[in-house]
Image (tube, grey):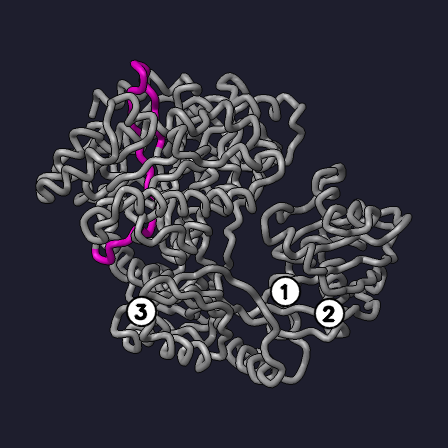
């Protein structure tokens, strides 16, 4: 391994020869087996174990369940046309419950290999990971996996296989066209002829691409004939003839961008500072001599080494011992140790220049944090996942003496997986874990018990609802406790076009800077009045705050406090302390005391909170419930069973298509009715039906359930049932 680290040290300072890539796909399409084979080709694991060892699934629960739960990084060297290239690879989860890890990995990389099963084609989660990649401006290439199944099981002719490939490539390119911004449309299409599409078998360790076949004088028919001669030996011969790592990594070097080229277009999407400033230019050019700036994408708490953070260096050079600042915090920290990743192992390195992925020890950080040698650097855009946590469990320690340990463990869990939302109530000892689905919470719970050694008991799953408004409110006044300050608010429902803009990630969720022309233009393009767009102060969790005041002298001094409390009310709505969604809050006017001492946080926070909550209560507030759009696939005989399951669970059948012997049904079901859906589906389809998540939406809870659910939530949270809820101070 010493040789490998020496090779890496030689290339690490040459960003043109670095490729930062992720492997992304639908669950069970063969990503981790595929990663194994790439590592084996780079000489990092033995050929015999490749595809069986699953090196990058190094947690026990990943091995037991046979799925990837955590993203894992590894650095390796590939030789292409007599030149050495450093490939920093991240293997990501495919299960939708662990999609947050995919989103964070995409911040660190510039390119992605989208792995797609030749038998199943483009699946819902393939679409989701592609959306996540393109949101971060990560360029994809395509690997069509499990081609051996088309040859052995389905016994397709080469022509029939070609038709299948063409269909998969066309559907991926259609997806790319629908998701890419205008300036990239048509430029990132994947094509068979240029080698940005490869196909093969990760399990049997071979792959093909048109340029490789031309170079070596090999045809697809040669591989098929190997399987016809002797199926048991075919895999070994094919792996020697067209080794997967060579074909794929050649395509990576050819078609995926190096760090310098990628940052030229990525930075303006993920960093909202001044691109013409010294820092901005260093970031755009991936300048190793510029100011150090890096983004944390993952944190793992190691029992021996403490907190280890994975980060992407966007500018400057990270060196052991460098003093740094975490954006938004005052204190300084030191980079105590730097690592290069080798799956579960880490190799120490002295310095890492811009354009690389590395591990850091010694800095207390959270995923998404920006670290820099400049104290007040504009942080990178927050990393936001496409879906939000919709299922919650209450968790408490079985033994009261374990309570302090549980609180500590929950803080660690929240840091290691920010897709998990944690509410800690130190007074009652009951804490809330919110996650993406039942499996997500089950895995976290198991890890708390087995890896962190805390015995816990949990409640049955609870659904997380949202609150919204349905009409324009009256103008409401919020008065400060000293009666010297008055603020006036109105709320209205946020139009669907603007909700889509925020949800798609086109508009970042953040406090808007004074001259953010780009964000204003996006709101205007979606139909907002130009004057109003320029008055947007804050975009927060699908809600916006607009400053509608005119000529208020001290408004600049209080606006941060108004934003603080706007965000607070959006986190805890007045109906049942559930998060708000799709609410536009307008500060219409305010009367402020001349003396700053009389308009501090203690006076303004209650005034803002009271004003916004009062306005919401006059705007016909209602509860929204989460629904998931699911794709069911089952043999045609069981269509009736699927329809019955959907209708029994208050669901809607949206679409139905026959594909040969199978039927594909698209249904929309309330999350509240989905507990136990997997086992119900298995028993009613004799284990042959399965479903996957296509989308997640929030829609009004049926009118007859509004009061019942509101009452249930209030009872669960021990809130008064008959009056507006007092917000936490």
Q: Are marks 2 and 1 in contact (CB under 8 Å)?
A: yes
> Nearest the camera: 718 or 602?
718
Up the image or down, 260 lies above or below 223; here it is above
Residue at position x 27%, y 41% in the image: 34
Task: Look at mark 2 in the image and give the residue it sits on.
Answer: 616
Q: Nearer the viewer, mark 2 or mark 3?
A: 3
Question: Which span is picked out in magenta?
Answer: 64-88
- Spatial separation of the CA atoms under disc 3 and disc 1: 41 Å
Say whether disc 2 or disc 3 marks the residue closer to the N-terminus: 2
Give the percent coordinates (x, y) of residue 468.
66, 68
Residue at position x 83%, y 62% in the image: 488
Left or right: residue 495 compared with residue 278: right
Task: Look at mark 1 in the image and give the residue it sits on.
Answer: 580
Task: Look at mark 3 in the image and give the residue it sits on.
Answer: 635
- Spatial separation of the CA atoms under disc 2 and disc 3: 49 Å
Up the image or down, 296 lies above or below 715; here it is above
């Amino acid at each position: 391994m010493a040789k490998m680290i020496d090779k890496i040290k030689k290339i690490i300072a040459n960003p043109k020869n670095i490729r930062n890539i992720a492997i992304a796909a639908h669950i069970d399409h063969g990503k981790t087996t595929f990663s194994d084979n790439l590592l084996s080709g780079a000489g990092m694991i033995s050929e015999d174990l490749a595809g069986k060892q699953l090196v990058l699934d190094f947690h026990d629960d990943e091995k037991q369940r046979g799925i990837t739960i955590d993203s894992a990084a590894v650095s390796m060297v590939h030789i292409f046309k007599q030149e050495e290239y450093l490939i920093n690879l991240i293997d990501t989860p495919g299960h939708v419950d662990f999609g947050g890890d995919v989103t964070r990995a995409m911040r660190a990389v510039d390119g992605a290999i989208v792995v797609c099963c030749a038998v199943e084609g483009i699946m819902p989660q393939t679409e989701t990971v592609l959306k996540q990649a393109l949101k971060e401006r990560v360029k994809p290439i395509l690997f069509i996996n499990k081609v051996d199944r088309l040859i052995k099981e389905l016994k397709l002719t080469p022509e029939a296989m070609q038709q299948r490939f063409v269909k998969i490539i066309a559907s991926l390119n259609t997806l790319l066209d629908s998701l890419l911004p205008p300036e990239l449309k048509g430029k990132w299409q994947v094509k068979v002829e240029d080698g940005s599409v490869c196909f093969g078998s990760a399990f049997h360790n071979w792959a093909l691409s048109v340029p490789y076949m031309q170079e070596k004088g090999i045809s697809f028919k040669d591989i098929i004939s190997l399987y016809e001669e002797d199926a048991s030996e075919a895999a070994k011969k094919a792996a020697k003839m067209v080794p997967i790592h060579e074909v794929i990594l050649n395509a990576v070097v050819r078609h995926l961008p190096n760090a310098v080229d990628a940052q030229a277009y990525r930075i303006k999407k993920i960093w909202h500072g001044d691109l013409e400033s010294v820092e901005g230019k260093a970031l755009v050019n991936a300048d190793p001599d510029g100011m150090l700036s890096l983004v944390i994408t993952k944190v793992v708490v190691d029992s021996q080494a403490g907190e280890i953070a994975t980060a992407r260096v966007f500018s400057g050079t990270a060196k052991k011992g460098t003093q740094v600042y975490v954006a938004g915090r005052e204190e300084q920290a030191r980079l105590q140790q730097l690592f290069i990743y080798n799956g579960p192992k880490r190799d120490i390195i002295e310095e890492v220049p811009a354009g690389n992925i590395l591990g850091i020890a010694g800095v207390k950080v959270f995923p998404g944090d920006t670290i820099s040698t400049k104290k007040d650097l504009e942080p990178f855009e927050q990393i936001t996942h496409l879906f939000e946590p919709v299922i919650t469990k209450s968790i408490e320690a079985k033994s009261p003496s374990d309570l302090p340990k549980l609180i500590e463990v929950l803080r660690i869990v929240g840091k290691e997986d920010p897709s998990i939302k944690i509410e800690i109530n130190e007074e009652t000892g009951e804490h809330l874990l919110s996650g993406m689905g039942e499996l997500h919470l089950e895995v976290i719970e198991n890890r708390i018990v087995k890896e962190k050694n805390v015995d816990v008991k949990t409640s049955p799953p609870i659904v997380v609802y949202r609150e919204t408004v349905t009409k324009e409110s009256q103008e409401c006044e919020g008065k400060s406790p000293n009666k010297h300050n008055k603020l006036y608010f109105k709320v209205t429902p946020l139009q669907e076009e603007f909700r889509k803009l925020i949800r798609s990630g086109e508009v970042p969720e953040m406090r808007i800077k004074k001259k953010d022309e780009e964000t204003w233009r996006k709101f205007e393009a979606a139909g907002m009045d130009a004057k109003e767009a320029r008055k947007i102060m804050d975009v927060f969790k699908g809600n916006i705050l607009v400053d509608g005041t005119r000529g208020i002298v001290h408004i600049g001094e209080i606006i941060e406090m108004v934003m603080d409390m706007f965000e607070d009310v959006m986190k805890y709505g007045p109906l049942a302390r559930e998060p708000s969604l799709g609410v536009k809050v307008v500060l219409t006017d305010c009367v402020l005391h001349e003396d700053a001492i009389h308009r501090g946080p203690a006076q303004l926070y209650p005034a803002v909170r009271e004003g916004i909550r009062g306005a919401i209560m006059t705007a016909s507030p209602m509860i929204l419930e989460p629904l998931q759009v699911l794709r069911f696939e089952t043999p045609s005989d069981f269509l009736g069973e699927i329809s019955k399951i959907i209708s029994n669970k208050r669901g809607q059948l949206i679409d139905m298509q026959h594909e040969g012997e199978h039927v594909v049904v698209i249904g929309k079901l309330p999350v509240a009715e989905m507990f136990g859906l997997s086992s119900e589906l298995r028993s009613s389809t004799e284990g042959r039906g399965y479903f996957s998540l296509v989308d997640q939406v929030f829609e009004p809870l049926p009118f007859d359930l509004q009061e019942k659910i509101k009452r249930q939530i209030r009872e669960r949270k021990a809130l008064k049932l008959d009056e507006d809820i007092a917000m936490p101070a």
